[in-house]
Amino acid sequence: MDRILPFFVIIPVFSAVSTLLVSRWERRKFPRIWSILTVSSLLVLLYFIWDKGVLVHEMGGWKAPFGVVLVKDSLTRFMLLIINGVALITLLYSYSYILKREDYLRFFSLFLLMLAGMNGVVLTGDLFNLFIFLEIASIASYVLVGYDIGAEELEAAFKYLIMGVLASMCILIGIAIVYSVTGSVNMADVARFIETNDIVDNKAILMATGLFILGFGLKAGFVPFHAWLPDAHPSAPAPISAMLSGVLIKSLGIYPLIRIFYNVIPMSPVVSNIFIFLGSISMIVGALMGSGQIDIKRLFAFHSVSQMGYIIVGVGLGTPLGLIGALFHLLNHSVFKSLLFLSSGAIQSSTGTRNMKKLGGLRESMPVTSGSAVVGALSISGVPPFNGFWSKLIIILAAFQVKNIWAASALILTAFLTLMCFVKFQRHAIFGEASEIVKRSKEAPLPMLMSLVILGILCLAIGLFNQTIITNIITPAQEILFDKGAYIMSVLGNVGGG
Amino acid sequence: MNTILLLHLLLVFMVIGSIITVEIKNMLSAVISVGAVGFILSVTFLFLGAPDIAITQVIVEILSLILLIRATINVDNVAIEEKGESIFSNRTTLIFVGIILVFAWIAFQSLPAFGEPSMRISRYYLLNAYSKVGASNIVASIILDFRAYDTFGELLVLFTSISGAFAVLRRGKIDKHKDHLKIDLET
Amino acid sequence: MEKKVESGMSSIVKTITSVMVGFMMLFAGYFILFGDEVPGGGFPAGVMMALAYILITLAYGREFVEKRVSGITASKLTDVGVLIFLFVGFFGLYFSGTFLNNFLQNNESLFFTSGTIIINDVAVALTVGMSLYLIFLALAIFGRVVCEGSLCKDLGRDSEEEKE
Amino acid sequence: MTLYFLDFLLFMIGLYALVTKRHIVKKILGVAIMEYSVNLFLILIGFKMSGTAPIMVADMDFATFIRTAVDPLPQALVLTSIVIGLGTLALMVAIAIRLYERYGTFDMHEINRLRG
């Protein structure tokens, strides 16, 4: 059954390369349908291996520490579900959104390569392999940010590229230091070496930890390293900013941090304090800077930074409840943030502007889009029936459980700031009096509406059935992270050290 | 003992070369000095017992020089004179770099001593490469057999960056109508 | 007033190039075929092939090379290279259960002793070579019209290389 | 040990160029220098004192080869990261040329100001 694991990378790569190869004879419909087919086949594969327990696929037939190994445990399947689910909905959305652009053959090829990179990052159990697939996903996202080659998009893509290369260099030096000290690049082998030789307070490992926090923090975009995010996300085409905010910063930034600091390098109190401190600062700064924005996409981008702060605080708390809250908020944020970005894309494509002041009373001319935007706004600001409320509540409870007053107060302050800011967004954009641009605008085409409605229903459904989702998806992922020995045993079996 | 001295010398040359690159005014000479640093690096790889990497570094260095010169050839390649406010940012960055270097000095103390790699995993490659894979160039066997998945990812990285560079370099709609050369672009 | 663009450099450069390109291709082939005994594998071979084509483009001008390996065939070869590597890996998965498995390894009967290493070498060299030649073609030729507006007097034919 | 430090100094010079220099090509050169230093750091880690290249030539018997061969794994990693560096360099040059075409200047502050 572990033969299925490599197909999560093979299928997107094969379809990405073949769309470019057969580009000559059929360009209108072929790439769009082909990419939707590939991503839905990935979801079917995920369904097959969903409850098969921990699967380990040794690449090339070599035993674990000597070859590259793919590991599927409950955290990996949780991330695969988010990545491929949001990607399918985004592809459905861009089925009609992309018609205005001329060279969308390469758009879908790069989109599928980004997806292959993210699947590769989430599946691999090898540090250097994680770096390579992180490079694939990042390079594809640099290009997709600057895809409609206007002046602003290119400038934002260049800034994102520079920050991304800096992050990759820091990660590579961190991997080099870990390899030099522990002698291996396989995550489970490194974890076992650190555990048996007890070199946690080794200065070099401390430096590698700092470099990992810097590198993956740049990719995740929380405060001290968020400079590229408010420029890159608004200037990307809407499906891409939904994928960036919804999935990319999580699977390239948060997931490696969680995997490394729970399964490989034990999380020392210094590291958890750093996470909580950075998380609470990025929450407050993101919400404050977000409230002053006029352009709705920039507003959403700043709130992405602040919601990332929630997840980092949850991860930094280190308690089971905190991690459950962080993972659940990761799922919720990818759903409602991609909903918000996709609806802003629909608004921009029909009214032509993203300026909150100019858009008023969208509910008459674009009822479905504004309806789904309201659902997204309510769930991001944590209004009870929707999914945002439950995950924020769990993180706040976890903060109180650990009696970390500073984090708890920052959490509550940000929840209030987000609520206020999104009420302002709804008042201006959705419920104000209809401006003349909005009167002329017509509803978005069907595929876009379908994806918006699906995401809206998901927001509500996760909110209502949060208990069942937590018990059978989130808690197993959290147990895997807290049980390092099981991870090492499942990957390495009991093969002796080299 | 003299290889250590030689490596120190080469590294000092590389540091001097990169300082010249950063501080020189003319862009073209900056590109040339980066090329020089790259070629010294390739010689260093030779002394560190990595012929594969030295060959690849030399050839890749030639190609990146071609690309970099392409970016600086027919544009105004004189550096921008620093305005006042940016001096302040230089100084803070220098302080920040100094702090990191001090911490790096402490951290590198506890790395395994230079010249004694732990080679816990790579002993297996040395022992089994010829018998199991039949290749006497161990590095090639690692790249294409033991960790072939890395090279597969590597191909994808190159394929994405070139396909992406093409997506960026394509003639957008906004360029076509004002394409002053009046060339009949038969698209 | 289409000035006849004198294609390529002087004849001295052309003769030297025609000699050197032969050796460069030979050297690249040497890397590929003896990749597993001698230092240097698929990557330097690919970059060497790209450099050989770039040398021809610089010396003989673009039209000469365009007839031999036009931009579109180069991009198709890049895709084919990646697909070869993918299929070799997939055959490994099909025959012996793990992706990228060296299923015909270390049997002396075959011409090349180390199994799929040579095939992978060819795929890597093909992809790296063609894609880097492509990027040179795009950067050098596309971008010729760098400065906007009428002040640009460059009259090189700027046919869009990729008929996307 | 001082070799690691000199190499990290090289990395810091690249980082300094990346952060403070306003000319886009200078930033690209800073990234190139950073990549050189990371590749060198990986090879420095795998170096064995008076070690030989990890290639089994015919005349060397197996035992001495095992004893003296340098660590081959970082060399495999460096080969990959050299070509990654080349890929990102090609992308950076492409975007830089397009930016110059759009804004008419390579100065990052100018571009920020124009973009507003």
Image (cartoon, helix red, strand yellow):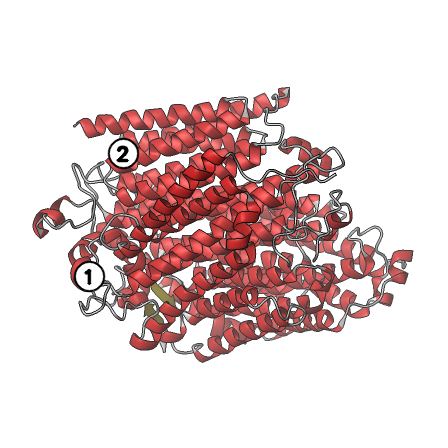
Q: Secondary structure at mark 1?
A: loop
> Which image quarter: residue B100?
top left
Chain at numbered mark 1 = B
Q: Is residue B62 visible?
A: no
Q: Residue at x 49, y 53 (%)?
A: A253
Which residue does the image show at 65% across and 68% down from the upper left? A27
**Looking at the picture, does residue B24 appear above or below residue C82?**
above
Task: Give the distance between the C-alpha atoms of the residues marked 1 and 2, in whole angstroms.
Answer: 39 Å
Q: Residues within 10 Å of mark 1 (few under 14, many from 20)?
A: many
Amino acid type indicated by mark 2: Gln
Is circle 1 on the same chain as circle 2? yes
Q: Amino acid at mark 1?
A: Gly
**Is B179 in front, or is A248?**
B179
Compared with residue D24, is residue C136 higher up or lower down, i.e. above or below?
below
Question: What residue lies at 24% left-to-right and 63% top-to-bottom?
Answer: C112
Judging depth in this view, the residue of A387 and B57 nearest the camera is B57
Q: Earlier in the sequence, mark 1 or mark 2?
A: 2
Frontmost of labels 1 and 2 is: 1
Q: Which residue is mark 2?
A: B109
Provide the residue designation for mark 1.
B134
Residue B26: where, in percent of width, then height? 54, 23
